Image (cartoon, coloured by chain):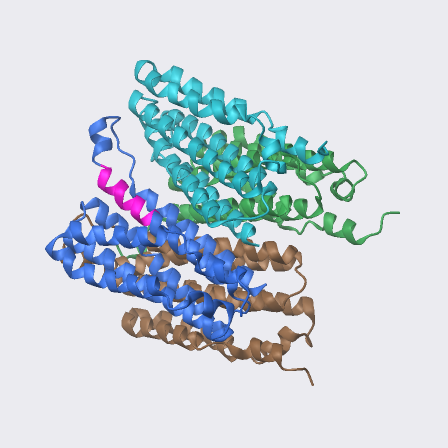
Chain colours: A brown, B blue, C cyan, D green
Amino acid sequence: MSKTRLEAFSDAVIAIIITIMVLELKVPHNPTAAALGELWPVFLSYLLSFVYVGIYWNNHHHLLQTASTVTGGVLWANLHLLFWLSLFPFATGWTGENHFAPLPTALYGVVLVMASLAYYGLQRRIVAAHGDRSVLARAIGRDVKGKASPLIYLMAIPVAFANPWVANAMYVLVAVMWLVPDRRIERTLTTPAT
Amino acid sequence: MSKTRLEAFSDAVIAIIITIMVLELKVPHNPTAAALGELWPVFLSYLLSFVYVGIYWNNHHHLLQTASTVTGGVLWANLHLLFWLSLFPFATGWTGENHFAPLPTALYGVVLVMASLAYYGLQRRIVAAHGDRSVLARAIGRDVKGKASPLIYLMAIPVAFANPWVANAMYVLVAVMWLVPDRRIERTLTTPAT
Amino acid sequence: MSKTRLEAFSDAVIAIIITIMVLELKVPHNPTAAALGELWPVFLSYLLSFVYVGIYWNNHHHLLQTASTVTGGVLWANLHLLFWLSLFPFATGWTGENHFAPLPTALYGVVLVMASLAYYGLQRRIVAAHGDRSVLARAIGRDVKGKASPLIYLMAIPVAFANPWVANAMYVLVAVMWLVPDRRIERTLTTPAT
Amino acid sequence: MSKTRLEAFSDAVIAIIITIMVLELKVPHNPTAAALGELWPVFLSYLLSFVYVGIYWNNHHHLLQTASTVTGGVLWANLHLLFWLSLFPFATGWTGENHFAPLPTALYGVVLVMASLAYYGLQRRIVAAHGDRSVLARAIGRDVKGKASPLIYLMAIPVAFANPWVANAMYVLVAVMWLVPDRRIERTLTTPAT
């Protein structure tokens, strides 16, 4: 029951974040192709962030599915994750409105790093509450993606000042890496422990 | 359980989309009938989009009701639908603020096409997960409405440049077509398979 | 199950409406008492609307609690109610920003009338689905409040043009009338039918 | 069931409040460090308010977990709490945008006082519905934190006019006090009554 409410609250916050981001796509006052064309960078940054928040929702969904107990520490680790996710609309808007300029691109990377570390912290809290031999612990395994992602984001931050397009390409790359369905947990859930 | 959370997240996103659209009805600074009168096109476009998002919620509700399992592919097909629905407030605001001008009307059609294709994709994913002989597969049947809708939207897009009012009438027509209660699934659910 | 999702969606929409209204309380740029003081009418209109939306949520909660089946007609009657509730933020903002001027006060009354009629329609749909001898039908009884409210709002609309303060007092009066806890349904639920 | 919906509605409202606050972090038009630097006070006030709303959600979660029945009085006590929480975005934005000036800091304290009193009222309503010997009544015990918090906020209000930084430090102090996990209810739930 406790878990249900944690999921419901997280769903609501993530749903609002994903929808607030679209507000940065400000309605142009003229009905012209030129006015629409100016919105491309904002649209692209919205698309990337939508995918990222979707990935977080998906992973959060899988992570919580394996959890059976929710401690006070898990509640706060979850709020910590939601805090960094709540900065996505700001970072997305700043990047898009400034056509992927260096500093906004770097800040976007900072938000990505912090969110991925917060997710990692939440995952560890939940594993700690269930034991190293739990379904979740086995499912996560070495967690290559989870460890590689913040490293790539970290590398992208200085790159953003040299060439923001390369940095943005790195963010896209990590997103694509995650879009490949994460079958780890599903596989472990259906494979009997031996 | 998995399904519950998918529904809850979709409900939240759709609820926010439907409510964000009303923000385009900007509060006028003067308490005059003239100031209110200027909002008619925005109000009409809001009304049309409210009905459309309501139709999507209704159909989504019926579609998920028949589903028993939710795969990773369904999660992403659902996010894909939510992405296009999230562009309703933008398309609605642009159309309304520009008094149903050609280009915004055409863009509205593009969003309608993409959302209907995304819905179709979600439906196919769910049917695929349940088998061709499932309740859902039988309920959908030939899916005349589901196939006609994107075709009508597609036709409306070039029409918008010739006469936007005809294009908007076509959007209204499809909405009315869906408002007629979709008894297919309900009927099949209560009719024993023979 | 169907009912659960109807409630969840309505909760989300009502929650967003109630929270969007507070956005009309625009943050002043100066940290002065004068700047804060100018917000009084907006604050008062927010307070009134918060109470009204709270009343709707409360009544909706009680109404749905007695329902066991949800038909397609109920889904649309519910969306119809949510549509009129979604105009509360606009009507509230217009009234507050224009210091309860006649026309905004009258429009507020129009939204109140339409919302109360939509609620009445939803109630009738649910009763129709459950039968005249159902718990709900007995609980509602003669429904004096439900019938008096739209009449008082209707009377307040012309009054708003003569004296908006009297019209606003009438809105407050109806709200207070509803704030007195509605024990009808609770009573009937615990009283055995004789 | 009744309780579930009260929780769902509160979750939605709190989720929206927490996410609306981030909208005060307005996206700067320039991609410069100077533009970002100007946002520090707004960011800090957002961080403090995020923690406060998180604390309320956490405590609300624990409080409702022990409740088994929800009366009409509890519904309204809950709406009363949500009303004051809904003023957090306004108070946060005003404080942040004016760099923690005296009057906004004092108003922030007023909102904190009112929210804590509303929470106290909700708690009393729930205890009243369950009896003085209930799990909840024992869990709350003397409720030192719950009684000290509004007193500290009250003291901070006049202090804000003398030195707003001291007042803000007092708000931070109370937040930290609550961040220390509240094990009272968890402890009592697992300790058999003797």
D48 or B93: nearer the eye? Answer: B93
Q: Kindly identify the residue that appears in the image at 39 percent across and 60 percent down.
A: B82
Outermost residue toward the front? Answer: B194
One can see residue D28 in this view: no
Specify whether C68 is left or right of A167: right
Q: How many marks?
A: 0
One can see residue B163 in this view: yes
Q: Kindly identify the residue that appears in the image at 43 percent across and 53 percent down.
A: A16
Q: Kindly identify the residue that appears in the image at 49 percent across and 62 percent down.
A: B188
Horizontal and vertical percent for residue D66?
Answer: 71, 46
Over which residues does the magenta segment extend? Answer: B39-50
Horizontal and vertical percent for residue A112?
Answer: 43, 66
Let me know if residue B43 is in the magenta part: yes
Specify whether A84 is left or right of C105: right
Let me know if residue B30 is in the magenta part: no
Specify whether C100 is left or right of C117: left
B182 or A29: nearer the eye? Answer: B182
Horizontal and vertical percent for residue A146?
Answer: 51, 74
Specify whether C61 is left or right of B168: right
